[in-house]
Image (spheres, rainbow, N blue to C red):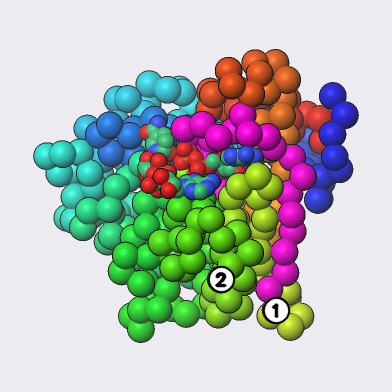
Amino acid sequence: MSHPAPPLPFPDRATDAHKGDFGRVLLIGGSRGMAGSIALSSMAALKTGSGLVSTAIPDRCLDTVAGFHPGIMTIPLADTDDGQFHLSATLPAFDSFDAVGCGPGMRTGPGSLRIVESLLQKNECLRVMDADAINLISEHQLLDSPALPRDQSTLVLTPHPGELARLTGVSAGDRPGQLAAAESLVEKHGLTIVVKGGPTVVVGCDADDGNAVRSVNNTGNPGMASAGSGDVLTGVITSLLGQRLSPWDAARLGVFVHGLAGDTAAAHHSQPGMTCVELLQALPAAIGLIE
Ligand SMILES: NC(=O)C1=CN([C@@H]2O[C@H](COP(=O)(O)OP(=O)(O)OC[C@H]3O[C@@H](n4cnc5c(N)ncnc54)[C@H](O)[C@@H]3O)[C@@H](O)[C@H]2O)[C@@H](O)CC1
Ligand SMILES: Nc1ncnc2c1ncn2[C@@H]1O[C@H](COP(=O)(O)OP(=O)(O)O)[C@@H](O)[C@H]1O
Ligand SMILES: [Mg+2]
């Protein structure tokens, strides 16, 4: 299959490499009814090359998530009766991981809010926030909280247009307005924003002058407009951050590989017929195409 050139090469593997060289990553999310979302992110991180993947989920989701892939290590956190993170849950030590991804399927209760606030506090850690983590940032205006660091240059946000509308107040139908609002946030906080869609645009910060820069992705197709596609992307970018790529490079290479996997899945299963499962399964072949 011919394909566009990647924005940067995929990380190399030395012959004597060991799993510690490819990142120990943590995924946090899921809730009763949406355990599949964080399982998708976790499997995507494994298939993108992470050395070790741990997944923190509400206790009652443990068996479901662990059952998806034997390579996932699970960390059960105390949960509420309706299967969300409990406010009193003992949180994992975020800084013992090379990268942390948070948000898919976790809903927006008080326990989830505490996790997102704790993660925003840790701006020395490489982090990806998606879905309900972004919704919590929007609902509680956390990026502007005086109690949290203003510099978030180690953070990648991956909103779809609905989530970006909540974050910026610019409606999902106004793509130019959304991109401009994403640029303002990037310039204010130093973060990287993956503005998802067809095509996805990565907005980051120029290292020299701090001005926002854009990179338009050239892979992917409308077959990916299907539940769970974005959950896969969260795992891909978290994995690349754990493999020591910068937020800007991990976001650009992540959306490229994710889109190429989508194109590979569509070639074999059709756009209407492909699902998040075929997308996930196509990740290794997509990586093989550009290695
Ligand atoms: N298997 C699972 O457990 C799944 C769980 N998921 C989780 O479900 C929760 C809700 O996420 P959703 O994204 O479904 O719900 P949201 O309410 O965040 O997003 C849906 C709304 O956003 C807007 N929107 C989204 N994409 C748009 C686009 N491209 N153009 C214009 N408007 C757009 C639309 O108004 C749409 O009604 C999240 O926690 C998510 O992670 C989903 O990821 C799907 C799979
Ligand atoms: N028309 C499209 N063309 C290319 N990519 C698309 C298209 N529609 C959706 N996608 C991709 O699919 C993913 C959908 O993410 P998201 O809406 O968060 O899904 P979910 O939350 O269900 O996992 C994004 O990466 C987005 O770029
Ligand atoms: Mg999503």
Q: CA distance from mark 2 to mark 1?
A: 13 Å
Corner quadrant of residue 189: bottom right
**Above or below, 158 relative to 256:** below
Q: In this view, which residue lies farthest toward the front?
A: 173
Task: Name the disc covering residue 211, or none.
Answer: 1
Q: Is residue 122 at all visible to an observer of this figure?
A: no
Q: Earlier in the sequence, mark 2 or mark 1?
A: 2
Under circle 1, the secondary element is loop
Circle nearer the viewer, 2 or 1:
2
Residue 78, given in percent of the width and then of the height, sits at 19, 44
Residue 129, given in percent of the width and then of the height, sits at 47, 55
Corner quadrant of residue 210: bottom right
- Foreground: 204 or 115? 204
Q: Locate residue 250 relative to residue 288 in the image: left or right.
A: left
**Above or below, 197 relative to 273:** below
The amino acid beneath tag 1 is: Asn
The amino acid beneath tag 2 is: Ala
Label 1 environment density (alpha carbons within 10 Å; few <14, some 14–19, many ≥20): some
Q: Residue at x 65, y 16 (%)?
A: 269
Q: Is residue 270 magenta?
A: no
Q: Residue at x 72, y 43 (%)?
A: 256
Q: Magenta segment range?
A: 211-238
| Ligand 2 - quadrant of the structure image | top right
Which residue bears the numbered disc 2?
A: 181
- Foreground: 42 or 227? 227
Q: Residue at x 35, y 79 (%)?
A: 145
Q: Quadrant of the N terminus?
A: top right
Q: Is residue 217 magenta?
A: yes
**Above or below, 187 relative to 174:** below
